[in-house]
Image (spheres, grey):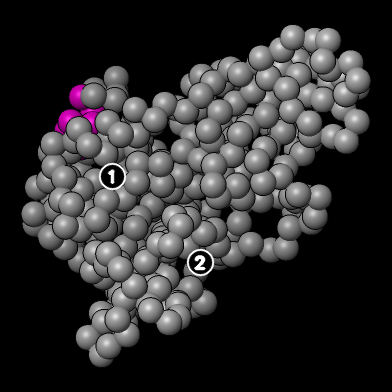
């Protein structure tokens, strides 16, 4: 075994391309070089050019279920004779053997969702896994601060704090501001060892530019879930009132992307979920999905000519994150400042 590198297999979540993009983003932000050996709906198999710590890495990632270390690849006829904790048939005639070296801690996600001091169930809850993924998609080598302009109860910033980033959070609701501040103080005490970590929470309408963040000391990444309308529990009746609500959501998202992007420096990222709404008879998609925003470029984070499930992946402009029969689905867009 090469002591200067290691082969790892990542067991992926329900949205495999999203999970892969997250892994690549985390590696790029930490100068970890890798070569893709195989990628499919279930697994990402990488040769990593340095020795890393999977037990630490699994705590950073939101879309990876477990990590396996590859010890050997043997002919299928010989595999039954070898006792190994992990075995998988990635090839027709060969079996990959190894050990499970890290598993996702479900309790950590539940703790961040259910044990934080302020919870507002009426507004819906951003899953901790998704919050972690949004943070990881937004970071670059130079990022030191995560900003969420639609902070709600601070779910995204809680994940940023747990990874050691300074955080800025804003919202149009004064109630949300108070709750977020309480939650972020709790998160800093519970998940961070860095006493110098900076937390800034302020009231602000995301449709306007937050001048207080136009500061050279901030290397900001924006990660956010915007206003999604109502907390719909069943297919949305397609009436005038609901159509107006969805149009309002679209307008707010477009305005906020234009305004917030002005605080970014070149190559800094803006990651946002844009909702899709399911009515009784069809799907409503927002104009913001196809909109071109001056100064921003949509990026995918997947390498050129990436092979997935044996096929070359076409250019990806967004990643879908949803649950079965969701009323509101999330489409994740990654923008880079030009």
Mark number displayed over residue 296: 2
Residue interval drawn in magenta: 184-189
Q: What separation in Å lies between label 2 and label 1 (alpha carbons)?
A: 25 Å
Residue 90 left/right relative to 20:
right
Residue 174 left/right relative to 213:
left
Q: Residue at x 51, y 40 (%)?
A: 63
Residue 331 left/right relative to 233:
right
Quadrant in which residue 262 is drawn: bottom left
Viewer-nearest residue: 323 or 197: 323
Q: Residue furthest bottom?
A: 240
Q: Position of residue 330 (x, y in %)?
A: 43, 61
What secondary structure predominates along the stretch shown in magenta? helix
Q: Is residue 35 above or below residue 55?
A: below
Mark number displayed over residue 215: none
Q: Which residue is mark 1?
A: 155
Q: Position of residue 134 (x, y in %)?
A: 43, 48
Q: Secondary structure at mark 2?
A: strand
Q: Position of residue 195 (x, y in %)?
A: 24, 22
Residue 321 visible from this viewpoint: yes
Q: Position of residue 83 (x, y in %)?
A: 74, 9
Residue 286 visible from this viewpoint: no
Q: Quadrant of the N terminus?
A: top right
Q: Is residue 323 above or below residue 76?
A: below
Evaluate if marks 2 and 1 touch, with contact meaning CB atoms under 8 Å apart.
no
Q: Residue at x 63, y 32 (%)?
A: 10
Q: Residue at x 12, y 46 (%)?
A: 179
């Amino acid at each position: 075994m090469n002591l200067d590198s290691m082969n790892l297999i990542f067991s992926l979540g329900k949205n495999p391309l999203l999970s892969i993009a997250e892994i690549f983003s985390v590696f790029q932000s930490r100068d970890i070089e890798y070569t893709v050996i195989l990628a499919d709906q279930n697994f990402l198999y990488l040769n990593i050019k340095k020795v890393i710590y999977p037990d630490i890495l699994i705590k950073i990632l939101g879309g990876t279920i477990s990590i396996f270390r590859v010890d050997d690849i043997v002919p299928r006829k010989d595999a039954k004779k070898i006792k190994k904790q992990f075995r998988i048939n990635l090839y027709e005639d060969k079996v990959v053997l190894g050990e499970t070296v890290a598993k996702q801690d479900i309790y950590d996600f539940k703790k961040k969702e259910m044990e934080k001091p302020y919870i507002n169930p009426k507004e819906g809850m951003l899953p901790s896994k998704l919050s972690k993924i949004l943070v990881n998609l937004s970071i670059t080598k130079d990022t030191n601060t995560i900003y969420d302009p639609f902070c709600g109860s601070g779910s995204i910033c809680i994940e940023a704090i747990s990874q050691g980033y300074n955080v800025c959070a804003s919202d149009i609701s004064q109630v949300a501001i108070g709750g977020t501040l309480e939650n972020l103080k709790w998160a800093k005490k519970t998940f961070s060892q860095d006493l110098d970590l900076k937390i800034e929470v302020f009231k602000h309408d995301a449709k306007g530019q937050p001048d207080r963040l136009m500061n050279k000391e901030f290397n900001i990444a924006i990660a956010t879930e915007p206003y999604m309308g109502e907390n719909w529990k069943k297919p949305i009746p397609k009436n005038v009132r609901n159509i107006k609500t969805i149009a309002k959501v679209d307008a707010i998202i477009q305005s906020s992307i234009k305004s917030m992007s002005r605080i970014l420096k070149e190559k800094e990222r803006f990651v946002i979920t844009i909702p899709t709404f399911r009515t009784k008879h069809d799907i409503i998609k927002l104009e913001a999905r196809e909109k071109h925003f001056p100064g921003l470029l949509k990026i995918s984070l997947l390498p050129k000519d990436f092979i997935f499930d044996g096929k070359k992946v076409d250019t990806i402009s967004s990643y879908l994150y949803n649950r079965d029969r969701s009323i509101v689905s999330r489409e994740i867009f990654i923008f880079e400042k030009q």
